[in-house]
Image (spheres, rainbow, N blue to C red):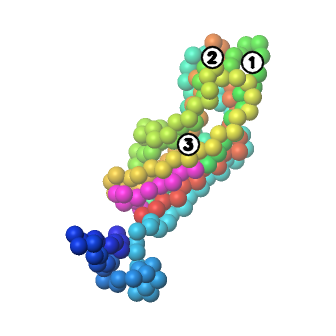
Amino acid sequence: MGYISKSYGGDDSYREVKHEECGCEHHHHHHRDCRDDEGRRLVDFEFSQQNGTATIIAPAATTVEQTIAQIRFGDVCSGDLVFLTGSTTITVPAAVTGTSLPAAVSVIIRRSFRFQNPAQGTIIYAESLPTPVVAGTTFLPIDHVDVLSGGDDGVVYTLSVSVTGGTSPSTVTVTNTTFTGAQYR
C-alpha cells in the first residue's frame, strides 16, 4: 500500500518522505509510472432472479425453510470480499378459518463451500419481519459483505426464507427476489 507523508523534525523543518513503492515525491497520483493497488478489483459477478412465486406453508408450531436463490463463485482466495445485495417481497395473507398468521418469518443467507450441502452452511445474514407478524406485503432489501478467510475451490451463497407456523398452519408468499454477488480481490 503506497502513501506520501511529511515528517517534521525537532527544528520545525520537514522533509517529504518518498512514496515507498516507486520513490516519487510530489503529486503521486499524477505520476504516470506510479500505480497504487490500494483498491480492490472486481473478479467475479453472479446473480439470481426468482422465477414465479414461492408459496411456503408451515404446519402449526413448525419451521419450514425454502431456498429462493443461489449464487456460486468458483475461485476464491483468503481475504476476498463478497458484496451480497438484493431484495425480496414477502406477502403474509390474512388468516382465514383453519390457518393462522406465522409466528416468525426470516430471510437467511448461508455460506457453504463446494461439495457441502448448502442447507448445512454457516448463516452469515438473517433479517426477520417484526413480531408479531401481521398480514400484508413487506419489501425487504438485503445487503451484506462477507470476508472470506480461507482459499477454497468454490463458495456458494444460498438465500432462503424461513417460516415458523403459528397456532395452526401458516402461509407466506415470496416474489420478486433478486440476489446479486460481487467478488473483490
**Vertical placement of 77 versus 156: above or below?**
below
Q: Nearer the viewer, residue 84 or 38?
A: 38
Q: Position of residue 153 (x, y in %)?
A: 38, 58
The reply to whether callout 1 and callout 2 are in contact (CB within 8 Å) is yes
Q: Three-letter amino acid code at disc 2?
A: Gly
Residue 111 sits in quarter: top left
Read off the magenta span.
75-85
Circle 2 sits on which residue? 166
When the figure is inspected, residue 63 is found, relative to residue 150, above or below; the finding is: above
The disc at residue 95 is 1
Q: Is residue 175 left or right of residue 146?
A: right
Q: Secondary structure at mark 2?
A: loop
| Kind of element beneath mark 3 | strand
Toward the viewer: 176 or 3?
3
The type of residue carrying mark 3 is Leu
Mark 1 vs mark 2: which is more N-terminal? 1
Q: Which residue is mark 3?
A: 159
